[in-house]
Image (cartoon, rainbow, N blue to C red):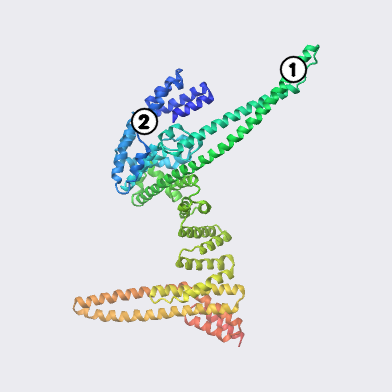
Amino acid sequence: MVFYRVETVKKKLGVRRSVKLAANTLFISLQHGGMALLFWVCSLLVGGSLAAQPVNLRRDLERYTPFPITETQELAQDLDFDPRGVADTLTARLSQFYLSDPSRKKIEQRQLLDGDENLYVREWNVNIQRLFLRDLLAQPQSSFLIKEAPNISLMHATLARALLRQRKPYHAAYHFAAALQYRSLRMDPEVFINSDRLALLEPNNPQIAAARQYADARRELEEARAELKRVQREIYAAEDNLIAKQAPASDEALRRQQEENRRLLQDQLAQNRNLLQRQQGRVSELEIRMKEQEQNFERFAVEYNAESSRLLVETAELVRQLEDAIKERQKIVNKKVLYKTEFNQTLLHDYSQNRQFAAYANLLEAASRLDERNPQIPFKLGVEYASSQDIRRAIYAYEKALEAQAKAPPELKLEVRQLYDLQVALGSLYFQANRMVDSAYFYEQALLIAPDENARSNLTYQVARFHIERTGNYRRGIELLKPYKATLLQMNPTDMVGRLNWVKQRFLVSRLLANANEKIGDEKGLLLELQAAIDAHGDLEQMIASQRQEVESLFKEVQEAKKPLLNETRMAEFNEFRRLEERHQAQQLALKEMLALRNSLPLGKVYFQLASARRAENDIAGALAIYQQAELLGLMPDEARRLAEELRRQFR
């Protein structure tokens, strides 16, 4: 608290600088309107002793002590089945807390506790959004920290969770912001040993004893080091006096006095050296003890920072919910209306320029720095940055998630599906960054941990295609595609949509294998795969022909069903007509999809490639037959006719 910090600084800096600090504290007290604090600072400025005002310190702390953490923790257990009761109880307690300070700002906060939705929306628009975007994360924590009050912070956070369960997001945002203001985001030694914070913890909290031991160990070590420096200075002074040149003595008495002084200096130097050795040993012992206390501090700091991180993540999720609501509102509200307020102008500018709001990512960034063992946070950051096409930051976040995964406790580790999505996302991001080796590595890693057969099958095709078309690792592409093709051929679906996709995939896989075999010089494999691609095209043509017959047959039935309707409208015939007409339209749509698929496939190139392979094998008749088949099917007929004539003239 402010009193604690002023007292500590006064001891270190002296009265003059402490008076200057008290003047700054007076400005803070005027801003917050604390009458007790103002009276205390004024008494300091007129010459009052800081140690003579213990009552004011206790009076300020007593505002916080009536709200023990244990009661709030017990209330938090009722969140799931009685959020309204929890919210009412905590609202009453916070009202009591803020009413204990009659300053203007606290009165405003008390009024806000009883406010309606519009007041909280205004508070979000004016203050809280700015806190998340700029003040909370862009400035040092001391610039916005009100007090280190864990009990008040927990009350605000629990109340925010209760309000979220009542679907009051703006109310919850206000209390999450207040919870963040009443705690330091990161625990440092000063926060750890702060006596006011320790007084507000639950009595049996192990931090209290650990913090006192840490403070005692640090104080004793500082005193021992100061004593060690004093002894070293005395030794240096004694050595300087011993080696200093003295004027020769004029008589025997003076000479004896000089020798006596020299002997005394040597004795004192020997004593100081012995004392130095003992003091060095004591400093070493205290340093070992201090390291043990620092390890205890690090353990508590990890827990504390992880709690801050969880609070930031909760707040980030809520901020994302509010941002999404604002974005939806922007889509349906006229821009001229939105531009009437400065806040909405800022929102529209941010969204139009960056395609995202910054608060969600900023909060997650802060949370990831606080809890480096939790891979869930950088994973969410990677998803956020990838969705906004920020490739560099997305890669960094995903890589950080992988590092955290290696040292995360079991309850925080990413699930197999999340790891799979992470590896696939990194492969895609490195591909977009034109780093093919890294992309191939992460794609291959994703193949090893695919969570199910469907994911493995889909990724196998993508990775094989990536190797054949991008990395040039044709043998690895063939190795992946052969078992994939064998599984594909065993499917043979009967429904129209499934069979259409099956034929398409057979064609694409065969063509990829043909290209890979051509690159490695496997002529036999090339011919087999080209023929398999043409067989897939043949199945597609059969489907198209069958579908055309079905469409024509249905068209005739529709016309027959329409004839009775021209004379007299009868319900049964009309219903039959509508049924046939709808079926005819559906079949016609399916036929269009088949034709569109045929037009999208590079069929002409496959036929010409197979004809070239036949020609290379001196199978001229086979090559001419393929050109003739392509011409009949309408696959680049002019080119097929020209190439066939050239082949006939050449081998006439």
- Observer-nearest of 30 and 92: 92
- Observer-nearest of 369 and 565: 369
Element type at marker 1? helix
Q: Which residue is mark 1?
A: 260
The location of residue 621, given as percent across then percent down, is 56, 87
Point out which mark residue 63 bears: 2
Say which label, 2 or 1, has the lower sequence index: 2
Quadrant containing the C terminus in the rendered view: bottom right
The location of residue 606, given as percent across then percent down, is 53, 76
The residue under the point 30% across, 46% down is: 83
Specify the amino acid type for callout 2: Arg
The location of residue 611, given as percent across then percent down, is 56, 80
Disc 2 and disc 1: Cα gap in Å? 67 Å
Point out which mark residue 32 bears: none
Visible in this render: residue 281? yes
Left or right placement of residue 232 versus residue 390 in this view: right
Q: Is residue 271 above or below residue 250?
A: below
The residue under the point 53% across, 78% down is: 530
- Observer-nearest of 107 and 411: 411
Element type at marker 2? loop
Quadrant containing the N terminus in the rendered view: top left
Q: Is residue 186 above or below residue 534?
A: above
Question: Dot 2: within a 10 Å radius of its alpha carbon, few (fewer than 14), some, or many (20 or more) residues?
Answer: some
Visible in this render: residue 341? no
Residue 195 occupies which quadrant of the picture? top left
Left or right placement of residue 520 versus residue 380 in this view: right
